Amino acid sequence: MDCIHLEKIRCYGYTGYLPEEQVLGQWFEVDVTLWLDLSVAGKSDAIEDTIDYRNIISNIQHLVKTSKFALVEKLATAIAESILAVKGIEQVKVKLSKPAAPIPDFSGRISIEITRNARE
């Protein structure tokens, strides 16, 4: 199966366990891998024969900006489900990161990664 990788999609959003995260918000970074058949597009050179990944990126940005979930796991699942609703995408991997999680004395990044299949 072929893949399209969309990486480092930066979005500001309001998902988080702490109440201030849902009020003040924070930056998120999203990487997605989309599994689909790209053979027809590879021969035709026509956008109609593939997915327009600009729409995928815009949808991710909208979801992150407008969602207020307590857990990043829920946000990642919402992103995966919205992507799998696009015709032709068979599987998706979503990596959702908080580059500056509000944890005292922690300067690292928190990331979760989920993989979902269209047939699930």
Image (tube, rainbow, N blue to C red):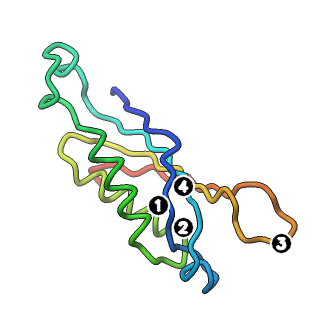
**What residue is at 45 percent from the left and 46 percent from the top?**
93
Q: Which residue matches tag 4?
A: 96
Tell me if label 3 and label 4 are in contact, CB under 8 Å: no
Tell me if label 2 and label 4 are in contact, CB under 8 Å: yes
Find numbered disc 4 in the image and state the secondary structure of the residue it sits on.
strand
Going from N to C along the chain, the mark reached first, 3 or 1, is 1
Query: Which amino acid type corresponds to the residue marked 3 in the rendered image?
Result: Pro
Query: Which amino acid type corresponds to the residue marked 2 in the rendered image?
Result: Val
Q: Which residue matches tag 2?
A: 72
Judge left or right: residue 111 versus residue 83.
Answer: right
Measured from the top left, where is residue 77 in percent x and y? 42, 62
Going from N to C along the chain, the mark reached first, 3 or 4, is 4
Q: In this view, does 45 lie above or below 106?
A: above
Mark 1 surroundings within 10 Å by alpha-carbon count, few (fewer than 14), some (14 through 19), many (20 or more):
many
Tell me if label 1 and label 4 are in contact, CB under 8 Å: yes
Find numbered disc 1 in the image and state the secondary structure of the residue it sits on.
helix
Q: Is residue 25 above or below residue 92?
A: below
Mark 2 surroundings within 10 Å by alpha-carbon count, few (fewer than 14), some (14 through 19), many (20 or more):
many
For the N terminus, give its image quadrant.
Answer: top left
Mark 3 surroundings within 10 Å by alpha-carbon count, few (fewer than 14), some (14 through 19), many (20 or more):
few
- Nearest to the observer: residue 118 or residue 68: 68
Tell me if label 3 and label 2 are in contact, CB under 8 Å: no
Disc 3 to disc 4, how far (Cα)? Answer: 21 Å
Measured from the top left, where is residue 46 in percent x and y? 14, 23
Q: Which residue matches tag 1?
A: 76
Going from N to C along the chain, the mark reached first, 1 or 4, is 1
Query: Which amino acid type corresponds to the residue marked 4 in the rendered image?
Result: Leu
- In the rendered structure, find residue 104 and report the number of the disc placed on it: 3
**What residue is at 66 percent from the left and 56 percent from the top?**
99
Tell me if label 1 and label 2 are in contact, CB under 8 Å: yes
Disc 2 to disc 4, how far (Cα)? Answer: 7 Å
